[in-house]
Amino acid sequence: MLNKILSDLKPYNAKLVAVSKTRPNEAIQAMYDKGQRIFGENRVPELVEKHEALAKDIEWHLIGHLQSKKAKAIAGFVSCIHSIDSQKLLAIVDKEAAKHDRVIDVLLQFKIAEEETKYGFDLDSANQLLDSESYQTMKNIRVCGVMGMATFTDNKDQVRAEFKNLKRIFDHLRETKFVNNQNFKEISMGMSGDYLIALEEGSTMIRVGSLLFR
C-alpha cells in the first residue's frame, strides 16, 4: 500500500506523513526500512518515547492537539507541528524552541469541518495573530502553511467543499501575509479516507495511517 500511496502522490509532488499513533515500534521500523522517513503522532508522550527508541533521522510531526504545557517535551526534536490553533500556543512553542536554539516549522490549524470537536482558527483570528506585535517578535517558529480536517462523513461533496475552503484560506494568506515567503507552501489535508480528494484540491501533505499500517 505504501507504493500505491506514493504513486498517487507523485503527480502532485506532495508528501506523505505516515500516521504512526498507537502503532508499535516494530511496525514503524518496517515502514522506515521501506524508505518512509516522515511520521506523525497525536500524543506527546508517545511521540517522545518513539523518538528516543527509533532512528534519529526520522522527521517527526506532531499532528494532534497540543497542550501548551507539553510543548517543552518535544521542542528539542520535533520537525513540524501541524496543530497550532491559538496565539498563546504559538508563543509557547516559540519560547521553548528558543531554549534549544531551534526554529520549528509550524502549520496553522483551521476549523473547516462542521463538527464541534475540531479545533482551529477562522480567517479573522488568523489575521489578528499574523498582524499582532507578539507574532512579529517570534524568531524561533516558522509558519509554513495551514492544516485542516474535513468532516467525518461519506458526503464527498461536503469534504471537497471543506478542502476547497482551506485552499482558499491558504491562497489568501499567501497573497496578503506571506508575499514572497518561500517557506509558506504547505497545505496539510487529507487522511486515509479522503486523501485523493485532498490532493485534487491542492494538498501538499497528506496524513495517512490506517491504510498503511494493516
Image: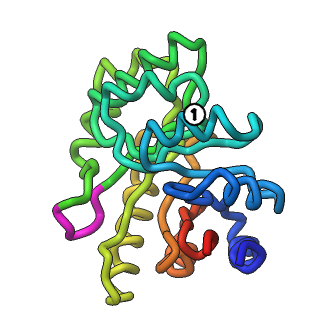
Circle 1 crowding by C-alpha within 10 Å: few under 14, some 14–19, many from 20: many
Q: Quadrant of the C terminus?
A: bottom right
Residue 180 in view, yes or no: no
Label 1 sits on what residue type?
Val
Q: How many marks?
A: 1
Picture coordinates of residue 77, whole percent (x, y): 60, 28
Q: Quadrant of residue 128?
A: top left
Foreground of the two, 48 or 72: 48
Which residue sits at x=34%, y=33%? 130
Which residue sits at x=40%, y=72%? 164
Foreground of the two, 206 or 145: 206
In the visual, does 23 lie left or right of 121? right
Q: Is residue 167 above or below residue 179?
A: below
Which residue sits at x=35%, y=70%? 150
Q: Quadrant of the N terminus?
A: bottom right
Look at the image and give the residue range highlighted in magenta.
111-116
Q: Is residue 174 above or below residue 19?
A: above
Q: Is residue 43 above or below residue 129?
A: below
